Amino acid sequence: MSQQSSDPTIYDGLMFVSLGAVIVGIVFLIMAMDGYGWSAG
Amino acid sequence: MNNIVSKILIVANLVFSLCFMCFAGAVYSFQAGWRDKANKTQQQLVSANGQVQDLQGQKDQLTKTMTANLTNETERANVAEAKVNGLDQNLTQSIGNLANAEKERDKHLADLLVAQREAQARITETNDARAEIKRLRDQSNEAIAIRRNLEDKNLEMEGKLAEAGMREVRFLKEVSHLNDLLRLNKIDPRDPVTGPVPKVVEIVDGRVKESRRNASRSAEYVQISVGSDDGVFKNMQMTVYRDSKFLATIQITEVEPDNAVGRVVEETRNGTIERGDNVTTKF
């Protein structure tokens, strides 16, 4: 039976940064849509 | 998480997440300009649509107007074409008339040229005739003058003829008287005349017209009013008197038909010879 390491790696940090970037992008899109009153036309 | 595929997917996930974040940020940053541009474009589109509608209305109106005008113009064109056809016919007829008129004109011009030449010839003939008439008039005037002169001479000769007739009658009486005397004295008129015969001096009475002395005042000459027609001849002696007073004796030196000039050969102291003094052959 191999022992599993529980320390976060660089890939975990990258995943966290990716999640933050997605959240920031979604926030930007929400703010932009709010400027149009949630109307695409 | 330890295999290579999972790592690659994590990196790709990171890249796409960052790209999404950048795209969203860019959209949020530039959407205000895009919106303004879109609103402006929308307004321009609305305005353009309004202009298009206006232009469409104007186009329809113009189309109607142009259609009406086209109809009118078509009618006018038809009328004008009919008129043009009529005018063409008239023009054709006029051209024909013009050709005929030109022919007539040429004919008249030719006649006119002939008439001008004839008139020029007539003028020349008239001038010649005028010159001939003038010459004949001059000749006629000369002939009239000659005729009048001849008539004057004829009258003068008739007067002289009448006078000669009277003289003939008188001379016949004298001849008859002399023949009677010859018969009475028993003298034959056919006997020859022997010795000098004195010239017969007729009684001639006249007047002194002028008395003048010559340049050296050595002789005085008297012009009298009787001449050869009155029986005065050269070297004839005549007596000048005034109121029964003897003034001078003159000897005729020059004789004209109606006057004569005499030289004073004997003068007295009873007075000088003046104009109007009497002159006679027998004082």
Image (cartoon, coloured by chain):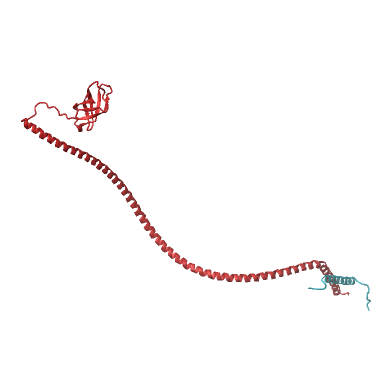
Chain colours: A cyan, B red
Q: Residue at x 38, y 59 (%)?
A: B108
Q: In this rendering, is residue B237 above or below A31? A: above
User: Seen in the image, is A16 located left or right of residue B259?
Assistant: right
Q: Residue furthest top?
A: B269
The answer to which of B88 and B206 lies nearer the viewer is B206
Numbered circles on residues, count: 0
Q: Residue at x 59, y 70 (%)?
A: B70
Q: Does residue B11 appear in this view? A: no
The answer to which of B210 and B270 lies nearer the viewer is B270
Which image quarter is the C terminus of chain B in?
top left
* Residue B87 image point, x, y percent: 49, 67
Q: Residue furthest front?
A: B243
Q: Residue furthest left?
A: B186
Q: In this rendering, is residue B127 above or below B44? A: above
Q: Residue at x 24, y 29 (%)?
A: B207
Q: Does residue B93 appear in this view? A: yes
Q: Quadrant of residue B182?
A: top left
* Residue B116 image point, x, y percent: 36, 54
